[in-house]
């Protein structure tokens, strides 16, 4: 229960975890100021989970509790939660029969057995319906289910699918978009046992589900699953910890496969659920790569936004009265410009930030400080003309509107995300993750500017590129759709896309991570802060044997980053050592903070 206690003259909030006969503290004890509410909002199971996550990520229990328990809303507490309906719709899991191990996985959940799987969805798969089926199977066994998705669009689709599968009032959806009162009301419905199925975004991974039988996550490689607040836990790891503590089933699904999911398969913790190659070849759209050699022989590739092959694929789809999806990895108009004469990247004269063009009629402006640079002059050659270095989604839509004057062009991205579009001829320009749905699938999917994903200075560059490409390619019409990717077909990530085989690339990436000693094959802590503060933290830490220190490298402004690496077995000891060292610095009242991230999502 929530209580108020006084520390150092200040009234602070806390939780009663247990009552014991005598205290371990030999000194004087203070009284509780008051019990805030009789509502039990922190169950023993969730408290144990929060302690586990705090230990794994070198954090403190209060930091994790802040993520797990939403703020109190008194009016919501005063209202009773509605009781569970008694009737249950007929269960169906026919969609899982397309996967050789799918039927046995659902059957194990129905029998309340501990089933754990990594699912690779087929192109065009109605994944919300499949997740609703496994939640219904768990519910039929008298146990609870918890499903986490990345964003509000996926949550809305899953919410509708569960309403169809289970009927109304049998589940609740939790997300940050809900108001405080509504979110707390739904949280109480789960903690009181009024519902046993909970879905939501990353914070819902801590939801108090009664008698948990299944935890599931969709597209665990999405960076939205990584918590941006300390101690920076990942929703996937939170759910895996819950599965271990509760002894329940687990499901990691997606069109792509992360290296962490591949490691679960190779370690024997989870079983692979995937269609056979014959089924994949039958339903997958045709993928055609365009390499540098083809672009060099294409007379219009240098001046046109679309290579000839991509233009022909779009034209054919439009003639078949189908929409065309064009994925562009950069938003905006011209997010990066350069000197038209010497090709030197244009930088802000004030802060040296990159210049961009927000529209065709606007003056160039800095992406960092926002200052306009209408009188820009190249410091290298003195030129005043600018050229596009990177083309954004809005500029792409403008050029396509000129190339296809009789076809409507729509954009979907940060300025406005389209949930779905009608199944009629149109060009849909989208940034990754904002692709709208269309009934029957797109006639063609064009993947442009692939170099922007492939050349990222990040450990997950290939994995992330394939994840975004598969998410778009899966929206093409099954079997009859066409996917054109402007990238060399000899690249491993393009080969995985050609065969729709994300498991092959995940196994390859995991083998390379083992050889290089990077997550998930090893445990790595990232320490970011002023150089003196990072050195003080490392000096105070009693690091386990075999620990390696890599760095430093420059980080933001006057900060540096150090990497501390150890084996997987030594990961817990490393996290506890760094947390203890952070506590020593806090007791010394050290002025500068050091951000500690265990297995950071981006490295």
Image (cartoon, grey):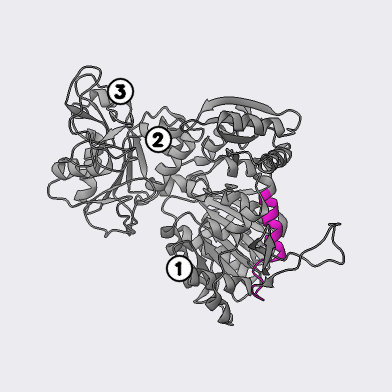
**Which of disc 1 and disc 3 is earlier in sequence?**
1
Of callouts 2 and 1, the N-terminal one: 1
Q: Position of residue 147 (x, y in %)?
A: 55, 60
Picture quadrant of residue 485 = top left
The residue singled out by tag 1 in the image is: 179
> In the rendered image, which quarter contains the N terminus?
bottom right
The x, y position of residue 131, in whole percent, is 52, 61
Please name the residue that numbered disc 2 is placed on: 453
In the image, which is nearer the foreground, mark 3 or mark 1? 1
Q: Residue 573 at what x, y percent from top left?
A: 74, 39
Q: Secondary structure at mark 2?
A: helix
Q: Is residue 37 magenta?
A: yes
Label number found at residue 293: 3
Counting from the top left corner in percent of width and height, residue 216 is at: 58, 57
Secondary structure, mark 1, is loop
581 or 181: nearer the eye? 581
Q: Which residues are magenta?
A: 36-54
Mark 3 vs mark 2: in front: 2
Within 10 Å of the Cα at label 3, are there few (<14), some (14-19), or many (20+) other Cα atoms?
A: few
| Lateral position of residue 372 relative to residue 451, left or right | left
For marks 3 and 2 on the same chain, the one whose residue lies earlier in the sequence: 3
Q: Nearer the viewer, residue 319 or 335?
A: 335
142 relative position to 395: left or right: right
Mark 3 element type = helix
């Amino acid at each position: 229960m929530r209580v108020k206690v006084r520390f150092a003259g200040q009234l602070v909030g806390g939780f009663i975890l247990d009552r014991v006969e005598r205290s371990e503290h030999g000194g004087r004890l203070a009284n509780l100021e008051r019990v805030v509410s009789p509502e039990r909002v922190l169950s023993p199971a969730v408290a144990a989970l929060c302690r586990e996550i705090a230990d794994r990520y070198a954090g403190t229990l209060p930091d994790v509790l802040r993520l797990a328990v939403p703020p109190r809303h008194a009016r919501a507490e005063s209202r009773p939660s509605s009781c569970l309906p008694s009737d249950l719709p007929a269960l169906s899991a026919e969609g899982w029969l397309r996967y050789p191990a799918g039927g046995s996985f659902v059957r194990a959940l129905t029998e309340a057995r501990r089933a754990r799987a990594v699912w690779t969805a087929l192109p065009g798969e109605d994944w919300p319906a499949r997740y609703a089926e496994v939640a219904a199977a768990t519910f039929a066994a008298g146990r609870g289910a918890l499903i986490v998705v990345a964003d509000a669009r996926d949550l809305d689709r899953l919410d509708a699918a569960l309403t169809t599968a289970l009927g109304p009032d049998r589940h609740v959806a939790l997300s940050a978009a809900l108001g405080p009162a509504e979110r707390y009301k739904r949280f109480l419905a789960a903690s009181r046992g009024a519902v046993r199925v909970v879905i939501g975004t990353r914070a819902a991974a801590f939801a108090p589900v009664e008698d948990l039988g299944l935890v599931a996550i969709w597209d665990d490689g999405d960076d939205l699953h990584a918590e941006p607040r300390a101690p920076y836990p990942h929703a996937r790891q939170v759910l895996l910890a819950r599965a271990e503590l509760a002894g329940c089933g687990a499901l990691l699904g997606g069109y792509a496969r992360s290296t962490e999911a591949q490691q679960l398969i190779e370690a024997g913790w989870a079983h692979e659920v995937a269609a056979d190659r014959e089924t994949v070849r039958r339903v997958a759209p045709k993928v055609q790569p365009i390499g540098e050699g083809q672009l060099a022989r294409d007379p219009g590739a240098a001046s046109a936004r679309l290579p000839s092959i991509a233009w022909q694929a779009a034209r054919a789809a439009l003639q078949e009265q189908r929409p065309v999806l064009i994925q562009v990895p950069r938003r905006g108009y011209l997010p990066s410009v350069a000197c038209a004469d010497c090709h030197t990247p244009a930088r802000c004269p004030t802060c040296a930030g990159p210049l961009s063009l927000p529209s065709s009629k606007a003056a160039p402006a800095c992406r960092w400080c926002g200052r306009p640079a209408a009188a820009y002059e190249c410091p290298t050659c003195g030129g005043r003309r600018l050229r596009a270095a990177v083309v954004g989604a809005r500029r792409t839509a403008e050029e396509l509107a000129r190339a296809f004057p009789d076809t409507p062009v729509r954009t979907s991205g940060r300025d406005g995300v389209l949930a779905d579009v009608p199944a009629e001829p149109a060009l849909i320009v989208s940034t990754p993750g904002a692709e709208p749905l269309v009934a029957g699938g797109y006639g063609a999917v064009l993947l442009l500017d692939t170099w922007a994903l492939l050349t990222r200075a990040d450990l997950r560059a290939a994995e992330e590129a394939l994840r975004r490409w598969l998410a778009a390619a899966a929206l093409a019409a099954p079997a009859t759709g066409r996917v054109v990717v402007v990238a060399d077909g000899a690249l491993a990530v393009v080969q995985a896309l050609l065969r729709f085989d994300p498991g092959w690339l995940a196994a390859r990436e995991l083998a390379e991570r083992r050889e290089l000693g990077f997550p998930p094959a090893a445990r790595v802590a990232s320490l970011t802060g002023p150089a003196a503060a990072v050195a003080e933290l490392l000096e105070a830490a009693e690091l386990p044997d075999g620990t390696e220190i890599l760095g430093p490298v420059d980080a933001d402004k006057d900060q540096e980053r150090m990497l501390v690496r150890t084996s997987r077995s030594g990961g817990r000891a490393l996290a506890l050592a760094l947390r203890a060292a952070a506590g020593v610095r806090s007791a010394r009242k050290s002025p500068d903070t050091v951000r500690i991230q265990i297995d950071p999502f981006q490295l």
